Image (spheres, rainbow, N blue to C red):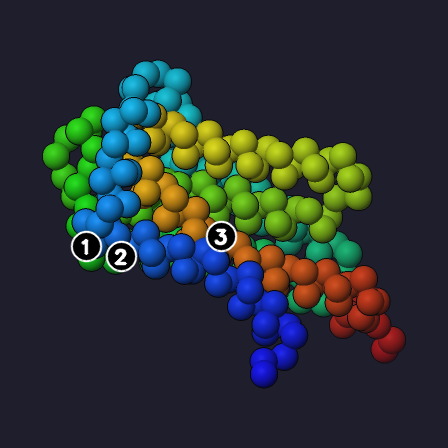
Amino acid sequence: MPPPAKLGTMLLLGPPVLLFALITWQVVVDGPLVDLDERLSRALVHPDRASELLADLGNVQVALPVLVIALAYAAWHGRAGGLDRWWLPPAAGAAVMVLVPVLVAPLKEWTDRPGTPAVPPAVGYYPSGHTATAVVAYGAATLLLLPLLRSPAVRRALVVACAALVAGASYGLVRRGYHWPLDVAASWCLGAVLLICLSLLVSRSSRRRSAGTPSRRTGPS
């Protein structure tokens, strides 16, 4: 029987992994979910300026600077506080962002899914890279900043802002017709897996800090 920590990790990662596998399987075999997906897309697509602006929230040029600011602040805060391994959470946050194109690009090539009628004929739309970028960039920034904030109200506001940015980008991509709904849903699952891994690392780091583990800079000489 696996230890409780490993069992907890499996329970966290299991649902998004299984859901991602199901969606990917349906896309590859052109299953019933794809028919439903296409009907839903036809009902939702209505290209306009608002949907275009919302979709832009998933652009690297918009989302990445937000993450970079959070990475820099988390690194500065940890180093200024003399914490041991202050670089680990920011490095992990950067690593999960790097993994987005590493994972998404091969999946796009393998699934070879065509785009919606609202975009020029092309393939490689599954999963949505813009959605994955938004989920991981805004989500990682939130996870890195939450342990540094003392006010519960500010923490809640940060979580709400993150959810709003991801939801806005996702809605804009579907509404504008840049992606099918399943493309977006699959990227939610992929992003959730990466953020869960980051969250586990950040929470362990926070527990070590709260336990008063002495750092090399502040411990006894």
Q: Which amino acid is tagged 2?
A: Trp
Alpha-carbon span between mark 2 and mark 3: 19 Å
- Please state the horizontal and vertical placement of residue 34, each as a whole percent of the image: 24, 43
Query: Could one spot residue 88 in this view of the protein?
Result: no
Q: State the residue at coordinates (64%, 72%).
A: 5
Q: Which amino acid is tagged 1?
A: Val
Q: Which residue in the protein does label 3 denote?
A: 192
Q: Looking at the image, which is closer to me, 206 or 115? A: 115
Q: Which amino acid is tagged 3?
A: Ala
> Disc 2 vs disc 1: Cβ atoms closer than 8 Å?
yes
- Please state the horizontal and vertical placement of residue 194, each as a whole percent of the image: 48, 57
Between disc 1 and disc 3, the foreground one is 1
Between disc 2 and disc 3, the foreground one is 2
- For label 2, the SS is helix
Residue lying farthest left? 121
- For label 3, the SS is helix
Q: State the residue at coordinates (73%, 35%).
A: 154
Vertical placement of 30 versus 130: above or below?
below
> Disc 1 vs disc 3: Cβ atoms closer than 8 Å?
no
Q: Which residue in the protein does label 1 denote?
A: 29
Q: Is 180 on the left-hand or right-hand side of 66?
A: left
Q: Which numbered disc flags the more N-terminal residue, 2 or 3? A: 2
Q: Looking at the image, which is closer to me, 88 or 39? A: 39
Vertical placement of 20 versus 37: above or below?
below
Q: State the residue at coordinates (81%, 71%).
A: 214
Q: Which mark is residue 25?
A: 2
